[in-house]
Image (tube, rainbow, N blue to C red):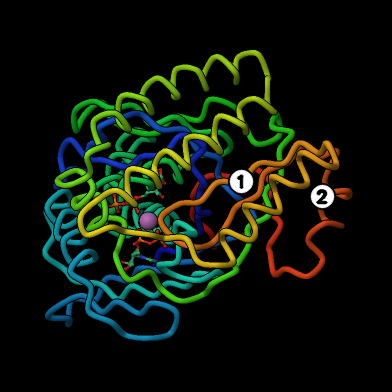
């Protein structure tokens, strides 16, 4: 049996549009921070007696076409037809905009690589995770991770700053636990097809990525977070404008966004928000401002996340 762990990541510059929906090749490059605190733990065990894979997510056996497609890809690479028992747990809400697909497929890739003896190097592992879920390509790595556009061979994640060099901390709010009604995969399809702002979103996000790399180079963390907040709102603007309109914000998301902006203006604290495809808000700040920031959110349920490590095998 192979066991692994991986952390979700929060994108400062979002992946929100596919060039190729089968290979999950992105229409624009993205940049994310891998998060400690939130975690997926996975085990994979080959069982020659099985007639299909068994997938147990958070203690419940479920059928998942996404997992089946992914496992078929693994078997094709391994030239092995054996099915497996896959058991996995997220210590945070699944399908709620905390990037469970990122940590889920990163952990699964690492465990499958071992159990099916794929012997994958870093780049191959990140490419395999990408096939499961685009954002998973970035959860293979630690710290700040860039994911470039390209072909199946050239599009994968690379850590550009290691965890210990990043002075950031993230409050991962769980203001709404319920699973999203429209998955990220489906939403991206609808937005690409119907949002009048899709093309300009992709153009702008590509430019944001370039600017972000420059800010990282200059260790200009505060402006990086400001750019991240604007990029997240740009993604949601394109999404809200789709037909049918997709709104991931809940009343509490709006409350939190408002509170962040007020605290920034009134208390002069460097705090910024970002939301993925879901209602749960991530609030970024600098580590040395954490105590002051935490005082402002006493009434809320959140998990502290520091820059986290990449996906790995465990005993
Ligand atoms: P999220 O915002 O949580 O990433 P998505 O809509 O992108 O939500 O993806 C949710 C899907 O990710 C689930 O339906 C499931 O297929 C997959 N997933 C979630 N957790 C795991 C896990 N631990 N292992 C494998 N796949 C997972
Ligand atoms: C808003 O990686 O979950 O979190 O590739 O279809 O599985 P699929 O989608 P997914 O999309 C993530 C979208 C996002 C932004 C991001 O993480 O960059
Ligand atoms: Co996801």
Q: Taking 102 as reference, is 273 left or right?
A: right
* Identity of the residue drawn at 45% across and 66% down: 96
Which residue matches tag 1? 273
Q: Quadrant of the C terminus?
A: bottom right
Q: Taking 278 as reference, is 33 left or right?
A: right
Dividing the image into four equal quarters, which quarter contains ligand 3?
A: bottom left
Give whichever of discs 2 and 1 has the lower sequence position. 1
Above-or-below relation of 42 to 155: below
Question: What numbered label is drawn on residue 293?
Answer: 2
Counting from the top left corner in percent of width and height, residue 150 is at: 23, 25
Nearer to the camera, 163 or 84:
163
Above-or-below relation of 85 to 6: below
Label 2, residues with CA under 10 Å away: few <14, some 14-19, many ≥20? many
Question: In the image, is the residue at mark 2 within 8 Å of ligand 2 by its beta carbon?
Answer: no
Q: Taking 313 as reference, is 263 left or right?
A: right
Q: Quadrant of residue 64?
A: bottom left
Label 2, secondary structure: give it: helix
């Amino acid at each position: 049996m192979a066991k692994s762990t991986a952390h979700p990541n929060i994108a400062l510059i979002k992946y929100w549009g596919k060039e190729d929906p089968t290979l999950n090749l992105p229409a624009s490059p993205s940049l994310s921070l891998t998060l400690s605190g939130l975690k997926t733990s996975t085990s994979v065990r080959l069982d020659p007696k099985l007639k299909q894979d068994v997938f147990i997510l958070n203690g419940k056996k479920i059928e998942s076409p996404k997992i089946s497609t992914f496992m078929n890809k693994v078997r094709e690479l391994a030239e092995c037809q054996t099915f497996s028992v896959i058991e996995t747990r997220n210590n945070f809400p699944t399908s709620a905009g905390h990037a469970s697909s990122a940590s889920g497929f990163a952990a699964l890739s690492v465990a499958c690589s071992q159990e099916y003896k794929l012997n994958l190097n870093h780049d191959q592992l990140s490419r395999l995770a990408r096939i499961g879920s685009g954002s998973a390509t970035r959860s293979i790595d630690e710290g700040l991770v860039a994911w470039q556009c390209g072909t199946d061979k050239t599009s994968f994640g690379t850590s550009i700053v290691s965890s210990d060099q990043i002075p950031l901390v993230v409050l991962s709010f769980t203001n709404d636990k319920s699973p999203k009604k429209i998955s990220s995969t489906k939403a991206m399809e609808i937005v690409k097809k119907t949002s009048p702002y899709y093309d300009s979103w992709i153009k702008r996000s590509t430019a944001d990525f370039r600017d972000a790399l420059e800010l990282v180079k200059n260790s200009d963390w505060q402006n990086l977070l400001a750019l991240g907040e604007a990029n997240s709102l740009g993604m949601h603007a394109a999404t809200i404008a789709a037909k049918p309109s997709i709104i991931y914000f809940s009343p509490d998301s709006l409350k939190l966004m408002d509170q962040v902006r007020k605290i920034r203006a009134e208390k002069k604290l460097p705090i910024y928000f970002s939301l993925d495809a879901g209602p749960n808000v991530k609030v970024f700040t600098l580590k040395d401002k954490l105590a002051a920031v935490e005082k402002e959110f006493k009434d809320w349920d959140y998990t502290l996340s520091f820059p986290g490590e990449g996906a790995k095998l465990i005993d």
